[in-house]
Amino acid sequence: MNTQAEDIKAIREMMEKSSKFLSLSGLSGIVAGMAAIAGAAFAYFYLLRDPSLTDYNHKQEILILLVDALIVLFISIGFGGYFSWKKAKKNRQTLLNSVTKRALYNLSIPLIAGGIFSFLFLLRGEVGWCAASTLVFYGLALVNASKYTLEEIHYLGVTEVVLGLLAAVFLYNGILFWTIGFGLCHIIYGWAMYVKYDLKKK
């Protein structure tokens, strides 16, 4: 009986590995969250603390916000790829395979569309709507890609969508919801995933 149970468990694990990207590291979420908080702090203290002093029609302010967001994005992607590569190597798995490509494809469509949509808001000086739209589209991207990876990604995506909708309701507090969504939530979910999937295997 025990042998049958072990065989079923082994088959289930093999099927899961072949259909889902399991090398996503919780550490990447923690780093992404810290980078987002740092980026949001910079945007607030240098640009958004007193909106009356900032004219978002000026190309300089728009460029600074855009560069700030891109730096956060590149740090998140860079460390996310690095930690995932280390985890895949440790588990003797291939990082770039058909499952990873499907996950990235499903992630990228809402993410790219949301990025363009949010950039249009930024060009028009609608910073509040920019924060709301990035959260909503990012959340939808996570939900869309979650069927190819860990289940926690689905719940993180739903959380981001809810925060984005709240940011749209409380428009002038967009930077706060952005910080919670991209910063605090990434750290919380990242730590939970790290404890659940990484620490237990050490």
Image (cartoon, helix red, strand yellow):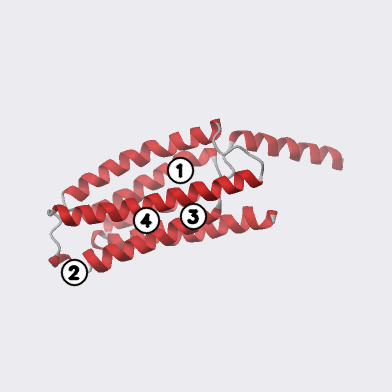
Residue at disc 2, secondary structure:
loop
CB under 8 Å between callouts 1 and 4?
no
Residue at the location (63% across, 33% down)? 18
Q: Is residue 27 visible?
A: yes
Front label number (4 vs 3): 3
Residue tagged 1: 143
For the residues marked 1 and 4, what is the alpha-carbon distance in whole angstroms? 14 Å
Residue named by callout 4: 163
Evaluate whether residue 161 shows in this view.
no
Q: Secondary structure at mark 3?
A: helix
Contact, CB < 8 Å: mark 1 with mark 3? no
Q: Quadrant of residue 68?
A: bottom left
Q: For mark 3, does the 10 Å Cα neighbourhood hold few (<14), some (14 to 19), or many (20 or more) residues? A: many
For marks 1 and 4, the one nearer the N-term is: 1
Q: If you read the primary sequence from the N terminus, does the residue marked by circle 2 or circle 1 appear first?
A: 2
Tally of numbered tags: 4
Circle 2 or circle 1, nearest the eye: 2
Of the residues shown, which amino acid type is indicated by label 4? Leu
Q: Are marks 2 and 1 in contact (CB under 8 Å)?
A: no
CA distance separating discs 4 and 3: 17 Å
Residue flagged by tag 3: what amino acid is it? Gly
Q: Amino acid at mark 2?
A: Asp
> Looking at the image, which is closer to me, 86 or 1?
86
Q: Amino acid at mark 1?
A: Val
The residue indicated by pointer 3 is 29
Structural distance between the alpha carbons of marks 2 and 4: 23 Å
The image shows residue 42, relative to residue 105, as above or below, that is: below
Percent position of residue 118, x then y: 26, 46
